[in-house]
Image (cartoon, grey):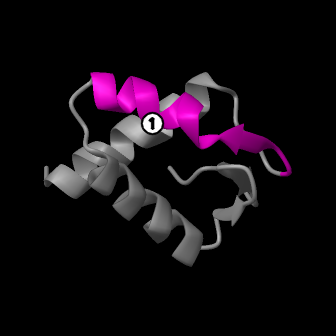
Amino acid sequence: MSRFEDTEAALTERLRAMKAKPDMTVNLFDIGVPLNDDGYSQDEIMEVLFALEQDKVIAFTPGNRILMLKALPG
């Protein structure tokens, strides 16, 4: 598994633990801090978030938050 895939799996698991669903906003702090504690860098996390944005799963919103646009893949 590549580092990107590993980071994506960890981020997706974190969002599922937070019960993220469409039309819900999530504070990036609530995602980033636990993933940083697990050894993922901010750059790695952001790379996955940008990919999810490109796939129109999330949208970045003001206040360091993301908006879930649709259900998480997989």
Q: Quadrant of residue 70?
A: bottom right
Q: Secondary structure at mark 1?
A: helix
Report how many numbered discs are placed on residues in the image.
Answer: 1
Give the magenta-colored segment's residue range: 23-37
Left or right: residue 2 versus residue 7 is left
Question: Where residue 1 sits in the image (x, y, percent)?
Answer: 13, 49
Vertically, is 44 above or below 55?
above
The relative height of residue 50 versus residue 29 in the rendered view (above or below) is below
Q: Nearer the viewer, residue 44 or 22?
A: 44
Task: Name the amino acid type tagged 1.
Answer: Gly
The x and y percentages for residue 52 are 52, 64
* Residue at the image point whose x is 55% and y is 34% from the top: 29
**Crowding at label 1, few (<14), some or many (≥20) Cα neighbours within 10 Å?**
some
Q: In the displayed structure, does residue 6 sit left or right of residue 26?
A: left
Name the residue: 73% across, 50% down.
63
Magenta part, dominant SS? helix
Q: Is residue 34 rendered magenta in the image? A: yes
Q: Residue at x 86, y 51 (%)?
A: 23
Viewed as shown, does residue 64 lie left or right of 48? Answer: right
Q: Nearer the viewer, residue 43 or 55?
A: 43
Spot the residue most to the front.
63
| Left or right of residue 29, residue 61 in this image | right
Q: Which residue is mark 1?
A: 32
Q: Residue furthest right?
A: 23
Q: Looking at the picture, how far across and down is residue 8, in whole percent?
A: 36, 49
Please name the residue shown 51% across and 34% down the image.
31
Occupied quadrant, residue 33: top left
**Residue 2, can we see it?**
yes
The answer to if 15 sits in the magenta stretch is no
List x then y, in percent, for residue 3. 16, 51
Visible residue check, residue 71: no
